Amino acid sequence: MFGWTGVFLRVDLTRNEAVAESYDAGMALNFIGGRGFAAKILWDELELGIDALSPENKLIFAAGPLTGFGLPNSGKLVVASKSPLTGSYGDGNIGTSAAVQMRKAGYDAVIIEGKAETPVVLHVKNDVAEFIDAQDFWGLNSFEAEAQLKLLYERTAGVVSIGPAGENLVRFATVVSQEGRAGGRPGMGAVMGSKNLKAIVFEGDNEIPAAYPEDMKELSAAGYREILTKPNFSFWKRQGTVSTVEWSQENSALPTCNFREGVFENADKIGGFAMEKIKVGNRGCPQCNMTCGNVVKDSGRGETELDYENIVMLGSNIGLGNLKQVAALNRVADELGLDTISLGNVLGFAMEASEKRRVPERIHWGKFKETKALINDIAYRRGFGDVLAEGVQTAAAKVGRGAEDWAMHVKGLEVSAYDCHAAPAMALSYATSSIGAHHKDAWVIHWEVQFGRESYSEEKINKVIEMQRLRGGVFESLTVCRFPYAELGFELEWYTKYLHAATGRKMPFNTLIYDADKILNLIRAFWIREYASNWTRDMDFPPVRWFKDPLTEGPLKGSMLDALKYNVMLKKYYRKRGWDERGIPKKSTLKKLGLSDEANELEQYVQLSE
Ligand code: SF4
């Protein structure tokens, strides 16, 4: 095969074994890579109903057929597992040189199984894998762990690690790389911690097989040049995603005080132009000239990378309007290996619970020191922090007395940084995302504001599905960044050209979209198989707050979602997806997508409609 290495590395931590396994072209062509590979492996190999934090769970690191060739925005991998936060499929992508080095070492994916007896670091160099005693690394934060490992290995080594949050099994712990590039929101870091795996170091110096290597080089150079010509390029380099703070404020979509409001009185203090005043540089994923990590000096000991999501969730959503302090919280979260989105969400919940006197702890909106202390308590599972470490859904159940109504999550995954009181399409996107309330797959709110906020129309459903297929299916499986397309208008044809040069195959976009649909339906089947008789279409509803508590401030004061209209919208969404009225893929839909075996298996757990 060209493009793909055709090899997975299967690592059994219980037995200290690592075996290279060839896989066939069918896997590559049907599931592409990244999310597609992870979903297929987890579907085929995971036993039903296992505890996500047990040795029976598997942790997958998977790249795509374009990773490692030096193409623009392609230095990413997907980390996936059964999630300890949602109880079903979970994943995230990380921009990291570990992706490049894993492919150069000869692997498209690494499958981690079992549990080491004591903490280990896995070192993979080409065809040699070794298990290093990591007792001296355990307890280090993720920045320290990577820095120390970099002293032991080549500077070019790619490292992914966990911080104390992953070690302490915080259910929204992430896997971290390169001081703040983190992924795996639904607790992939906790799964890694449950396996006593502190870090993986990848080093590779093999040539990745390309069908047309010269074309590859030319296309790569041309792609970088093309990105430089895009009109929005220079502003993107100045602010990256942070300019969205001002946009969200103008459009009442800026989560404020646990998503109670969509406007924040200090938005100008945490927005793109405020950020530019303290910015000292840009950082980014490998093989990218758009480098969107805005490096700023924080209020404490160092520097951190800011983007829209972490500013909003650790800023307006907890009532904090001091950007240097937001930056300091962000750095602490990255060091500890906590997902900044879920963290800001549970902190907002805790502050509201305190304000409403539902918990004895006093945690006030916008108080930096209190918040920082609570973040540490979450990572080390101390006191109330231990409750919050379980995620907002479980914390709300524990607090009780209606707290579930203002716990902002879908299927257990905390909502990310867009308020949807007046954004039905974005609410649908959150509610039907493959991993719970995450914005990455169908980020439609910008389009929706231009289209018209009020409607629950067919166009909106179509847009959500289109973006889920493209961003959640194609980009996540190719493991390429969505921003060139989404933010600069980088044309999709580039990817088919890249794929041809890499694999030697003509893979038109409609084939990729078909594969994307297959992957998204397989993930849906995974959810249904796990939940079986407990599955209900209520799981595809956004949080209750957006239906019950109208906005009380800003130009959209009084706005909230309409439950009846949303219900109709969801029904239509199911129909367009080929799912039945319960939201379960029909047998005919799965068959049409080449998932007949999966349909037969799913039928053992739930009755499928024809
Ligand atoms: S644009 Fe940002 S997220 Fe995308 S590859 Fe570049 S640095 Fe990474």
Image (cartoon, helix red, strand yellow):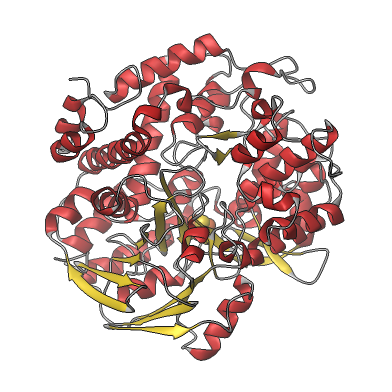
- Residue 328 is situated, as x and y percent measured from the top left of the image, at 77, 61
- Residue 124 is situated, as x and y percent measured from the top left of the image, at 36, 80
Nearer-the-camera pick, 375 or 556: 375
Q: Residue at x 62, y 46 (%)?
A: 342
- Residue 237 is situated, as x and y percent measured from the top left of the image, at 60, 57
Left or right of 455 on screen, residue 459: left
The answer to whether 235 is drawn above or below residue 95 in the figure is above
In which quadrant of the rendered view does residue 260 lie? top right
Left or right of 311 on screen, residue 165: left
Residue 323 seen in this snapshot = no
Number of dots carrying numbers: 0
Q: Which residue is drawn at 60% across and 40% down?
A: 394
Left or right of 513 on screen, residue 239: right
Q: Which residue is drawn at 37% across and 15% down?
A: 572
Which of the image's four quarters has the C terminus?
A: top left
- Residue 384 is situated, as x and y percent measured from the top left of the image, at 75, 49
Q: Which residue is drawn at 32% across and 71% down?
A: 12
In which quadrant of the rendered view does residue 356 lie? top right
Which of the image's four quarters has the N terminus?
A: bottom left
The answer to whether 341 is drawn above or below residue 527 in the figure is below
Residue 357 seen in this snapshot = yes
In which quadrant of the rendered view does residue 284 lie? bottom right
Q: Residue placed farthest to the top in the image?
A: 564
Nearer-the-camera pick, 530 or 173: 530
